[in-house]
Amino acid sequence: MIQPTFDPLAPGSAVTLALLGARVGGVLLIAPVFSATVVPRAVKVGVLVVLTVLLQPAALASVRNVPQITPATLLSETVIGLAIGLGAAIVVAAAEAAGDVMAIQIGLSGAAILDPLDSSQTPVLGSFSRLFAIAILLSLNLLPVMLGAIADSAQAFPVGSPVSLANGVGVMVQTGSALFILGARFAAPVIAAVLIANVAMAVLGRAAPQINVLAVAFPVQILLGLLTLAAAIPAMGHLMGGWAAISDGMLGQVVRALAPAGAPLGVR
């Protein structure tokens, strides 16, 4: 089978290229790594142009009628791109939220460093959890999976096709609740260990009032929390390794919400 090639002079090529760029731009706005402020804008623009040109033949092949560039179509394409990158972004955000919660529970919330990804001051554990999650996702072919999702989306939603924006955005907001659920699962071992330690210290303080519990509790709490975190890292990595299933589930919900009533879906 002859593979389609990039042809800027084909009918509807320029319009398809512009709308596809909005879809790819939506992915780059939210996808881990690319959305980091440390990535130069010139690099982001270059990646946007390259990906758009590479994916344009597949998108053009699925277009039935030449689309029009309107604010509605540009917004629709951007929302589709945001939906594609939503799953991975939520996993990374959940890991960062779990790190912040663990830092508060352990007592390291005051230990802040410069986050290299967004150039902001964040707790050490939050920054560590975020970088750890990104490393896991990159090791599991995050970028090729997203590129495949963009290509597959051209079959489900041809460039310029009408979508139900209100339903799609509403479902995307609802799926954001998964951030808190995942964050609680990531941080659960450390929270449980620190809670047990606090209860034990409270009992010790009641049993031996002469002991300065506060002087003992902080070192014990920090040491126990860090040891529990070190022991729980393999389990956290295993949970993050299931990001593809999480992303597919969220993308499926958004795709069903974006599809107009009665429209067939071209992806699973």
Image: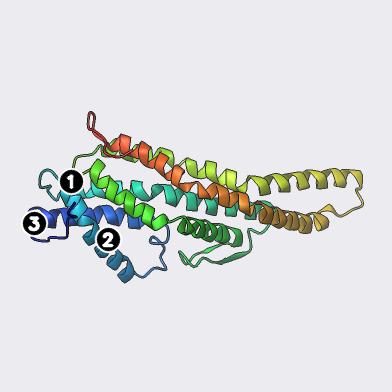
Secondary structure beneath disc 2?
Answer: helix
- Mark 1, residues whose alpha carbon is within 10 Å: few (<14), some, or many (≥20)? some
- Mark 2, residues whose alpha carbon is within 10 Å: few (<14), some, or many (≥20)? some
- Tell me the kind of residue under disc 2: Leu
Give residue 58's position: percent from left, percent from top.
Answer: 21, 52
Identify which residue is drawn at 41% across, 39% down.
Answer: 249
Give the alpha-carbon distance from disc 1 to disc 2, as whole Å.
17 Å
243 to the left or right of 227: left
Mark found first going from the N terminus, 3 or 2: 3
Q: Circle 1 is placed at which residue position?
A: 62
Q: Circle 2 is placed at which residue position?
A: 51
198 to the left or right of 65: right
Res 157 quadrant in image: top left
Secondary structure beneath disc 3?
Answer: loop
Q: Name the quadrant of the C terminus.
A: top left
Give the alpha-carbon distance from disc 1 to disc 3, as whole Å.
14 Å
Mark found first going from the N terminus, 1 or 2: 2
- Tell me the kind of residue under disc 1: Ser
Q: What kind of colouring is applied to the model shown? A: rainbow
Q: Circle 3 is placed at which residue position?
A: 10
Identify which residue is drawn at 52% across, 50% down.
Answer: 240
Badge count? 3
Mark 2 and mark 1 in contact (Cβ < 8 Å)? no
143 to the left or right of 150: right
- Mark 3, residues whose alpha carbon is within 10 Å: few (<14), some, or many (≥20)? few
Give residue 155's position: percent from left, percent from top.
Answer: 24, 43
Res 167 quadrant in image: top left
Give residue 239's position: percent from left, percent from top.
Answer: 55, 47
